[in-house]
Amino acid sequence: MAKEPRLTHITALILQAVDAGFVYGFSIMEMTGLPSGTVYPAVRRMEEDQLIRSRWERQEIADRERRPPRKYYQLTSTGKTALETARKRYPLLQRLVPTGEARS
Amino acid sequence: MTTRVENALRRMHLGLLWGASLLVPGSKRSEWSREWRTELWYVLRECFSATSLSANSRSVREATAFCMGAYQDAIWLRQRSWQEQQSLAGICRSAPVCLLVLSGICFSAWGVVRISSNVAAGMSRIEVYPRQVSENHARPCDCAFDATNKVRSLATARLWFDGFSHYQIAPETVWGGEVPRTEWKVAHARSDFFTVLHLPVSLTGHVRSGRDRLPQIVLSRETWTRQFASNPNVAGTELHVGSVDATVAGVAFGASSGLPGRANAWLLGSDPQIAGASPEFLVAHLSPAGYFDDGRWASSMLGILLAFLVLPFVTHAPLGDYSSRSHKPPLARRSLFWAFLIAKISGIVAIVYFASVDLACLFVQPFSHLSGNIQAASAVVLCFLGANWAFRDQQLRCPYCLRRMAHPVQVGQPSRTFLDWNGTELVCERGHTLLHIPEIPTSWFHAQRWVCLDGSWQFLFARPRGR
């Protein structure tokens, strides 16, 4: 059973960023403005709490685009519920990271 | 920015990541490194896409800051790993795990005993005692058991073996059937020679039985090969052995070849007579179980008893009293506390017994007169250490949940004791009890003291969900 998610500002912000389509570490950093030393441990904690899950991009896709494969994150159902709670708690969240702003 | 500088910067940043990766627990290092190196690739691509020098220097600083963040991530992972290890240590503090570990050690020691027993029995399946018939035919003993040793009598040796027999080698002229007149070394033995020694006899065929049957002769493998051309139907062949007629009963393979005297055949059914000029051999079969059920347990038990008698005089391990203001645990809990101590001591006694036999068996020859002494001495030492540990461990067990007390804290008022601290306090992780151990025994506080915590303390010890 998953632990009760800790909805800090950072957690909420990262959840919102992932939901908005910023699905890998560097893009989350760029969007939220948080340093790497904050984003990556937070992402690991969230993954441990089953708010998000990760998967590696297929090597063929990365090879085709001549770049290393990325590790992508996506919300779990628990994460989506937690994000809904966070949005109610932090009404400005959606304005900070509007959904659909993600770059490819 | 030139490619050369780019490469230098890339290597520097990769070096930073490599340094951070050393902090990451080994099981997660490769995945961690892969992710950070990938991310660095994208960070550097962003950096080197800028053209102006000022933009570049800022980007390099950003890339370096990115890599420095890896150290925070690595430290977080390392701390997380320590937390997991601490929760594992918490599991190890529980009483069932303690008993499980003791059982495991006991089982391992027993396993070594069984292996040693089989090895010893396998090595000494046949013990041979050259019996000194005359000074001229005295032979050196080539076995572990020294028959000339006056310390161990044959009566003692009987405890180790489950079968004795003897045979006498005599030269005999043998002929009959396809065998021409040949001089053989024939061992005269009892009819139950091979049965008593658990030696297999192969190629036994239809040998005539009954009152008028002839004495049986069992061929050695070499004789069967050389004289009978490995004929599988050799059983039943009649031979003249000296003045006796005998029937071939079979061929002795395997362990029989190790019997001394290099006999060509064993003539069974004739009780060997001691002759002045013929060497006679006494042979015994070692029982695998007999080696350990022969009264050797007495050496270990003597050592264990001695250790328990000495223990109170050399160690002081009070199990503590209770504060006058504190509630005592209920009788059922206290009974469980003592039952756990008894279970631990029982486990230790079993471990000591098996381990002392192991030591006696592994470090000296199984039948050496030293083995009993080593067994007793090792039992004393091991039991003393084990019992001492059992009592000291029990001192630090919560009387309610039997878990090891944790979080030791030095407490006290230096001005009142002339010492820095006058004691150590430990607390039960479940919040049942507080244990105060005085640094030095005083007239008002001579032994460790338990303080049972009431329910109002429980909120401090509530475990977080999911852990």
Image (cartoon, rainbow, N blue to C red):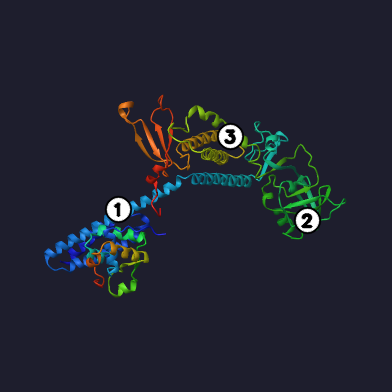
Q: Mark 3 points at which residue?
A: B370
The amino acid on which the numbered mark 2 sits, given as a three-letter code, is Val
Q: Mark 3 lies on which chain?
A: B
Is residue B15 visible from the viewing direction of this image?
Answer: no
Q: How much space separates mark 2 and mark 3, taking CA atoms?
A: 51 Å
Disc marking residue B75: 1
Q: Where is residue B288 in the image (x, y as percent from the top left)?
A: 65, 45
Badge 2 marks a residue whose secondary structure is: strand
To the question of a shared chain for discs 2 and 3, the answer is yes
Residue at 41 percent of width and 28 percent of height: B445
Image quadrant where residue B22 sits = bottom left
Camera-side mark, 1 or 3 = 1
Q: Report whether B163 appears left or right of B338.
A: right
Q: Where is residue B373 in the image (x, y as percent from the top left)?
A: 58, 33
Q: Which residue lies furthest to the bottom in this view?
A: A64
Q: Which chain carries label 1?
A: B
Q: Mark 2 points at which residue?
A: B179
Q: Where is residue B73 in the image (x, y as percent from the top left)?
A: 29, 56
Badge 3 marks a residue whose secondary structure is: helix
The amino acid on which the numbered mark 1 sits, given as a three-letter code, is Ile
